[in-house]
Structures are given as structure tokens and as C-alpha cells.
Image: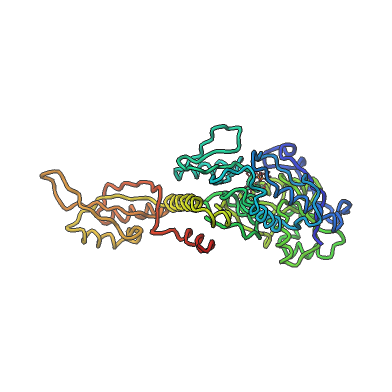
Amino acid sequence: MAAFVTPVWASSASVGTTPRTLGASGSCVLRPRLRSAGRCRSRAGVSRLRGERMRSAMESDTVVDKADAHSLGTGAPASPSAPATVAESAALGAAESKNGSVREGRKEGIMRLAIPSKGGMADETKALLKAVGMDLVISNPRQYIAKLRDVENLEVWLQRPSDIARKVANGDVDLGITGHDLIAEYAGMSQEIVTVHEDLGFGACHLGIGVPMGWSHINTIDELFAEYANAPEPLRIATKFSNLGERFFAEKGFSNYRFVYMDGALEASTQMGTADIILDLVSSGVTLRENLLKEISGGMVLQSTMQLVANRTELQKSKPLLGVARELLERIEAHILGADQYNLIANIRGASPGEVARKLAKGTVLRGMDGPTISMVIPPQGMDEGMYAIALVIPKRLLYRAVQELRSIGGSGVCVLPVTYVFEAESKRWNQVERALEL
Ligand SMILES: Nc1ncnc2c1ncn2[C@@H]1O[C@H](COP(=O)(O)OP(=O)(O)OP(=O)(O)O)[C@@H](O)[C@H]1O
Ligand SMILES: O=P(O)(O)OC[C@H]1O[C@H](OP(=O)(O)OP(=O)(O)O)[C@H](O)[C@@H]1O
């Protein structure tokens, strides 16, 4: 049966010779596969450890929430009724939110958005907010609270990405920007999470299994399972994604494993000898490679990008919050759509707008989003008439083809402008949110 062992706390600052090489040795250490599991806990011990971790994780300091004071494993002893899974914890958190116990310290009428406090995701989130004209205003860089320019009654809380998922689920914050992987791991079963935008266009990665490169006979998930199905000692898997991992292995019918909980730098664990394989996020694959690990076919658990999520109960009861969520969503989706397009302006000679339109129709990419805009150019006195300006929006990847097609029908002076936003007639995503909220 799957089990947790005592958490192994690893600091990325304390290991590794290069930023991405986490092991001390340069060669692959092919681990003896069947090691003694001396520290494996009993079933009861596992539940207790889980309960403690989850309770601790769900506890929230609503006054000043130090984003770096991550307290997994240090919470108060769990009661016999402590939630066994994160999903149960999230549900419990939501219930606590409703009866007000976690709302202490929260100002009436003030909405809350949580965004990543540090690292690449923090920078990208700030850049996105700036790009949509809702710049982050931080008055005190040592505090974890900020504002969005021109948005009244909204506090922006800078939080660790994993905490954001939990805090949206339990209603400590109303809105959050964080990774889909973390939402799935820490609040995946919570009915309280509503996805407002499923792909903010950054933070793409996947959760996958990494095995030592030296295991040349293991290249697929089936080969891995076959190797360990009846092994006397369970497969040791270093991860911080135990919920997603547990679900994945259960679906595949594999149970002879146990998790070695690590918070970071877990690519080091196989060479260090603390785990046999890892389950971690992969983006470029460089960290895996440089730590002598490889992915295996069928070992991908989940794909992820950054998302905008909201707390269902809070959205249902607050019109101002609905307004802020909708504006954020619409600005972001119009920006993402616009970022992929160019606005082309060119001159074309013709006898009439109709004739110019017919010329444009000969091209394969000159229709624009809803057809080209054609307007008459008024020449200075004494100059030839019959010049028309056309404007159309095209996907960036089609730019050069569009220029060639314009030239072939007599186009000149092609100007290319960036598109800041494309707002469509209505936001289908927002319609979905309203349906999800049963509004
Ligand atoms: N290459 C990547 N590696 C890890 N996470 C990535 C990557 N690309 C995007 N992400 C996203 O960023 C999230 C993690 O962000 P970050 O690395 O800043 O936090 P963390 O320090 O791992 O999390 P926490 O502080 O909550 O433990 C991931 O869960 C994922 O959604
Ligand atoms: O495939 P790659 O592009 O190499 O990226 C993957 C690495 O990035 C993440 O670590 P992060 O830098 O967030 O540090 P962490 O180990 O502390 O989570 C992840 O845990 C991997 O280690």
C-alpha cells in the first residue's frame, strides 16, 4: 500500500554544483533497487502525518501571512477527525470560511486576489497584470500586500504558489493566480474552486516520472510497474505531489510504492540514495537531464499552465467581486488573443472599394478577422485618385505571407502594428463562469 515516510527536507541552496545539477557526483549512481524501508510508517502513522500536514497547510493567518513561513509538517497534532486528504481539508476550510472562523481580520467589502510572491511565476504574473493595464502597486516591498492600479477595494496578497491554491479553496482569498498542477494537487476535489481562465499563457510544464538514465531496460510505465509489482520493497518515489501521484498510480493499478516527501531539489534524491525515482515538474527537461534522469513513456501525470481561479461561494455572494473577476478575465483574454495578432495597414490602387475587396479575396490570408476594412485615401489636390487604405488583423505567424500577397495585388506601404487587445462580442469564458455559478 502507498505510504508516506518521514519528510526529507532538502534545500536547493545546500546541494549542487551548478544551478541545475543537484547531485555531488558526476556519474549516475544506479541504485540497488530493493532497499530496506526501515523508516516506513505504519498505516495509522501515515494517516496521522497526513492529517497533520493537511491541517497545517489549511491553517491560515489572515492578518499578516508570511508567504515564506511554509509550515507543512509542523502543525498541531491532528484530532481523530482530522481530514485524511487535501480535498477534505479544502472542504473543511470552506465550511470554516462560511461560519467565519478563518475570516477574522478581514475587512468588510474588501476583495482579495493572491498572486505568486517569488520566482519566475511572480515576475510573469506581474508582467501580465502590467500588460493588461492593471499594474501591481507595492507600497512596502517588505510586506506581502499590494494593490492593483485603479482597482478599488481589492487587496493583492503575495503568496507561495501552493498556498494560493489552498487559500482560494478555503475562501481566505477570493481570486488567485497559480499553476493548474498546484490547484489539482491541493484543491483538486474542492467544489469551491471555479476556473476563470484555464491558461494564462505562461508557466507551461508537466508533472512526470523521472527514472535514472542508467535504467536502460526501463523506458515505459509498464516496464517500471512490471519491475516493481512484486518486489519485496516498495518503489520509493520522491515528490511533493502525493495526491496526484496517488491518484495516478491507483488508476494504473500499481500499489507497491511509497512516497518520499520533498519540497524541492528532488532531482538530487536518486543520486543521493533517498529515492528510486521522482515525480516532479518538467518544463525544458534540462534539470532532469543534468541530474542523470530520464522520462519514460506513459509517465506523464498532468499538464499544467498558470490559471486564474476564484472561490465559488465568494463569487456567488458578491457583485463587486464578480465585476473585478470579469474585468480581470476579459482584459487578460483580450490581451492574450491580441498578443498573437498584427494589425496590417496598406495602400492598394483600385477603381472602387468593391474592386479592392475582390483583389484582396484572391489572397489566402487577407480576409482579416471579419473581412478587411477598406477606406478611401484622399490625395492632395492634383494627385491621382483611386487609392484605398486597407486594414486587417492577421495571426502573427502569417505576417510574411500576407505581405507577399498584398504585394502581388499591388499593395504598397505595408505598416505592421501590434494589437494590444481583441475583445470579442462576448466572453465565452465568462459565460461559462456564470453557468458554473448558476447565476
Ligand atoms: N519549470 C518549471 N518548474 C517548476 N514549476 C514551474 C515551471 N514552469 C512553471 N511552473 C509553475 O510554477 C509553479 C511553482 O512556482 P515556483 O517554482 O515559484 O514555486 P515553488 O517554490 O515550487 O512553490 P512553493 O513555494 O509553493 O513550494 C509550479 O507549480 C508550476 O505551476
Ligand atoms: O524542466 P526544467 O525546465 O529544467 O524545469 C524543471 C525544474 O523546475 C522546477 O524546480 P524549481 O526551479 O521551481 O525549484 P524547486 O526544485 O525548488 O521546485 C522543477 O521542480 C524542476 O526541478
Q: Quadrant of residue 254?
A: bottom right
Q: Quadrant of residue 218?
A: bottom right
In the displayed structure, 187 sits above or below 143; it is below
Q: Nearer the viewer, residue 28 or 157?
A: 157
Q: Nearer the viewer, residue 71 or 298?
A: 71
Q: Can residue 244 be spotted in the picture? A: no
Q: Can residue 346 be spotted in the picture? A: yes
In the displayed structure, does residue 334 sit left or right of residue 345?
right
Q: Residue 223: percent from the left, percent from the top? A: 75, 64
In the displayed structure, 392 sits above or below 104; it is below
Q: Residue at x 29, y 62 (%)?
A: 361
Colouring of the image: rainbow
Q: Residue 362: percent from the left, percent from the top? A: 29, 62
Q: Residue 157: percent from the left, percent from the top? A: 59, 42
Where, quadrant-wise, is the N terminus in this rendering? bottom right
Q: Nearer the viewer, residue 3 or 27?
A: 3
Q: Residue 400: percent from the left, percent from the top? A: 37, 52
In the displayed structure, does residue 311 sit left or right of residue 371?
right
User: How many numbered circles does the render carry?
Assistant: 0
In the displayed structure, does residue 151 sit left or right of residue 385?
right
Q: Nearer the viewer, residue 426 or 238?
A: 426
In the displayed structure, does residue 299 sit left or right of residue 82?
left
Q: Residue at x 77, y 49 (%)?
A: 270
